[in-house]
Image (cartoon, rainbow, N blue to C red):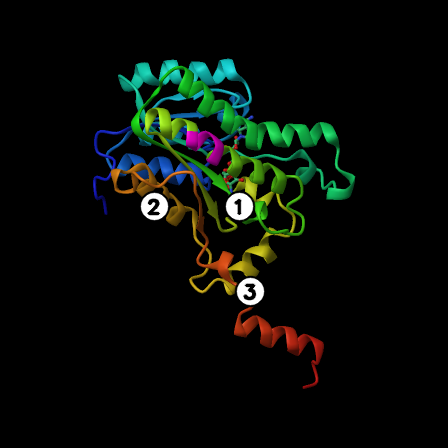
Amino acid sequence: MSYNLLKGKKGIIFGALDHKSIAWKVAEKAYEEGARIVLTNTPAAIRFGEIEQLAEKTQSIVIPADATNVNDIENVYLQGMEFLDGKIDFLLHSIGMSMNVRKNRPYDDVDYDYFLKTLDISALSFHKIVQVAKKLDAIEEWGSIVALSYIAAQRTLFRYNDMADAKATLESIARSFGYIYGREKKVRINTVSQSPTLTTAGSGVKGIDDLYDFTDRMSPLGNASAEECAAYIITLFSDLTRKVTMQNLFHDGGFSSMGMSARAMTMYCHSLNPEE
Ligand SMILES: NC(=O)c1ccc[n+]([C@@H]2O[C@H](COP(=O)([O-])OP(=O)(O)OC[C@H]3O[C@@H](n4cnc5c(N)ncnc54)[C@H](O)[C@@H]3O)[C@@H](O)[C@H]2O)c1
């Protein structure tokens, strides 16, 4: 069902790879809610993913860009604004990658070149897309910027590795830039901290299936799906949330506020004393 929440709005979406991607669901929903959009991803992701199908479905175009490259980002805005006939109202950063995670390097034996790459792709790219947007004055007043984060920014989660540091930086960038962009142009910036989700990036974290099951059972409302995440992000792009900025917003079925559930406690005690 559509509420026309984004009627007349224009946006750029970074990070749709295939139909499982969170950005893919956001693009579909934004289109459904009346927005016009432009999609972007790396040339390799465009070649190997399914983004062209999404562009067709949402009457958008795909502009190739490596989000760590400032010239590429500039080109996305210039071409994007031409296609959309003017400035944009919303921006999604849905980008993450760690070679240390991919290559299974433990946190106490990381490769530092990989680590720098993790920070550049998963965190600094967010600063870059906001800074370039501001310099080009590409975003309308009361525009909205959202980036995807994960609770490993605050809590230690086994195997999330250097991505935890990247997410902590990402969330900090939202606050630091949110102050400046809000004060000067009334543009709001938030991060959405999403439940584990079985996407390509998510599946790169070893043991995600067990973690997914654990958080699903531990959250009173269960894990949030990619579609539910997209629906929440649409509200943040809409005019209904104009005074929400510089926040890290948990979208995780309540997991972030849980300590111990009755069910988990029973299982814990049972595993210690199986004969009882
Ligand atoms: N899947 C989860 O469990 C989960 C949970 C919380 C947050 N997130 C975050 O959600 C976001 C989206 O991930 P997803 O789960 O939809 O997976 P995904 O694999 O579908 O998306 C990751 C995207 O990052 C893009 N990317 C990688 N390097 C890039 C670069 N240099 N320039 C531009 N784009 C680049 C990939 O091409 C891909 O489209 C990420 O920030 C991720 O950390 C995911």
Corner quadrant of residue 184 = top left
- Could you tell me what secondary structure mostly forms the magenta stretch? helix
In front here: 194 or 128?
128
| For marks 2 and 3 on the same chain, the one whose residue lies earlier in the sequence | 2
Which of the labelled discs sits on residue 259, or is there none? Answer: 3
Callout 3, which amino acid? Gly
**Residue at the image point whose x is 46% and y is 39% from the top:** 21
- Residue position marked by numbered label 2 in the rendering: 231
- Residue position marked by numbered label 1 in the rendering: 150
| For marks 2 and 1 on the same chain, the one whose residue lies earlier in the sequence | 1
Local crowd at mark 3 within 10 Å, few (<14), some, or many (≥20)?
A: few
Q: Is residue 115 left or right of residue 55?
A: right
Callout 2, which amino acid? Ala
Which mark lies nearer to you, 1 or 3? 3
Which mark lies nearer to you, 2 or 1? 1
Label 2: which secondary element? helix
**Residue 105, percent from left and from top:** 74, 40
In front here: 207 or 151?
151
Q: Is residue 123 left or right of residue 249?
A: right
* Residue 67 versus residue 16 in the image, above or below: above
**Residue 91, percent from left and from top:** 38, 30
Magenta stretch containing residue 86, yes or no?
no
| For marks 1 and 3 on the same chain, the one whose residue lies earlier in the sequence | 1
Label 1: which secondary element? loop
Q: Residue furthest front?
A: 183
Q: Is residue 32 left or right of residue 205?
A: left
Local crowd at mark 2 within 10 Å, few (<14), some, or many (≥20)?
A: some
Callout 1, which amino acid? Tyr
Q: Are marks 2 and 1 in contact (CB under 8 Å)?
A: no
Magenta stretch containing residue 178, yes or no?
yes
Local crowd at mark 1 within 10 Å, few (<14), some, or many (≥20)?
A: many
Corner quadrant of residue 39 = top left
